[in-house]
Image (cartoon, rainbow, N blue to C red):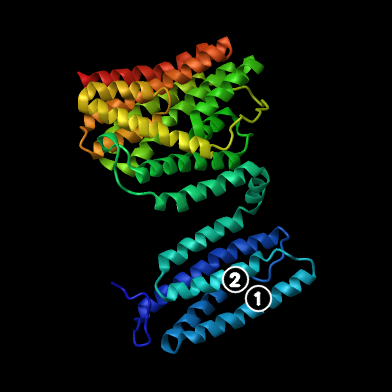
Amino acid sequence: MENILLPPDASLTLSELMFRITIAILIGLFIGIERERRKKDGTKSFAGIRTFPLISILGFIAALIASITHIGVFIAIFVVFGILVSISYYLSSKDGGYGGTSEITVLIIFTLGALTFYGFLLLAASVSIILGIFLTFKTQFRAFAGKIEEEDMYATIKFAIITLVVLPLLPNESFGPLDAFNPRKIWFMVVLIAGISFIGYVLFKLIGTKRGIQLLSILGGLASSTAVTLSFTQRSKEVVSLSRNLAAGIVLASTIMFPRVLLIIYVLNAKLANMLLLPVGIFTTAGLLTGLLLWRDKGDVDYKSINLKNPFKLFMAFKFGVVFAIILLLSKAAQTFVGDQGIYLTSIFAGFADVDAVALSIVDLVNNELALNVAVVAIILGAITNSVVKMMIAYFWGSKELGRYTIIGFSGIIISSLVYVGFLVI
């Protein structure tokens, strides 16, 4: 394996050296092009398409000299370069420029040039891509920041706490009836579900509300298809003429539930996920087709924002953990005392509450030698129940048109699901 951190007595071949410095130059060019493009927009910057590759080369050469002599040489060059950048920032701030983005960027590029010499090519390239994203989407990030509410900040902090602080402290041991409760495992499921919902919510915030019901339904479905259903159901009574499109939106949001659950399962048990690829593909296709068939173009309709709140709240996290633990206990008890039929019944009733909890509890049973075909049927039954619940919400609480179109829309998902389960059971 290639020696990455090179001691003074190590050597690189000329071809290896040229390859690495080429990567350093390309990284500098990549960022330099973005900065040069900003200059066309009127943004002041002391570095552009030529300067950034030179800075990357400087970092590379500093690392090369340090590898031959002493690390102190690299530190000295970096400090001198940092002083020059600081002077540039001071002079630009006197003229009214207070951003500092370009100054920080050149320091990073210098460091990336050094990393390419030491062989961290993938790391340097990855960081440059992330850096390019931050520089390119400046306007979008500012718009996103303007949409963040105080509640979102608190939720983000709490999510970080339960992930980085609470999870590592929990014991990784099973106890209780049938050894069904493992605190760290249960809390990991909480973090997993909250994380996926949180990402969907962030995407929802980034896209905004001017993209129409279809895109809002898909992104909202990543965060919470139930929330989308409740919001669109209420909206159908306010604007009855949109009922058909709102029904299509509910079906699309609920359809996203299938690949969402598949992703969660794949993280935990790839073999079970592979067995679910076919049915999930069928149900997702059926849902997309029926949702799109329901859709009617309404022209330039001013769609109001759906009432999708930040999905992460500590109470909801604890609630999910409790629900997951209860379903896990009931499923293990059903498997022990009743057999496969008991697991099916548990999944059906648990589907009224949360299909994610059903899927995760079944995955845990599979890891404890539950048959894969039984697990597939149980997960599908839970998803069917959850779909029926959302269909009933729209039917009883929404406009008459919404109820009618939602039943039509869900029929493809439910019928295809029942047919597939029938083939598996028979």
| Residue 276 in which image quadrant | top left
Marks 1 & 2, CB-CB < 8 Å contact: yes
Disc 1 secondary structure class: helix
Residue 262: mark in rendering: none
Residue designated by label 1: 85
Task: Estimate the x, y position of residue 323 in percent, counting from the top left.
Answer: 41, 31
Give the answer, above or below, for where 150 lies relative to 380. below
Task: Estimate the x, y position of residue 342 in percent, counting from the top left.
Answer: 26, 22
Camera-side residue: 203 or 192? 192
Camera-side residue: 332 or 122? 332
Residue at screen point 65% across, 76% down: 85
Residue at screen point 31% across, 27% down: 330
Task: Estimate the x, y position of residue 148 in percent, counting from the top left.
Answer: 64, 44
Q: Say what amino acid the circle numbered 2 marks.
A: Val
Residue 326 visible somewhere in the drawing: yes
Give the answer, above or below, for where 353 lies relative to 33. above
The residue most toward the right is 95
Callout 2: few (<14), some (14-19), or many (20+) C-alpha neighbours within 10 Å?
A: many
Residue at screen point 66% across, 46% down: 143
Q: Say what amino acid the circle numbered 1 marks.
A: Val
| Residue 351 in which image quadrant | top left
Callout 1: few (<14), some (14-19), or many (20+) C-alpha neighbours within 10 Å?
A: some
Task: Estimate the x, y position of residue 104 in percent, counting from the top left.
Answer: 62, 68
Q: Quadrant of the N terminus?
A: bottom left
The residue most toward the bottom is 69
Residue 106: mark in rendering: 2
The residues tagged by marks 1 and 2 sit, at their Cα atoms, a distance apart of 8 Å
Residue at screen point 38% across, 18% down: 414
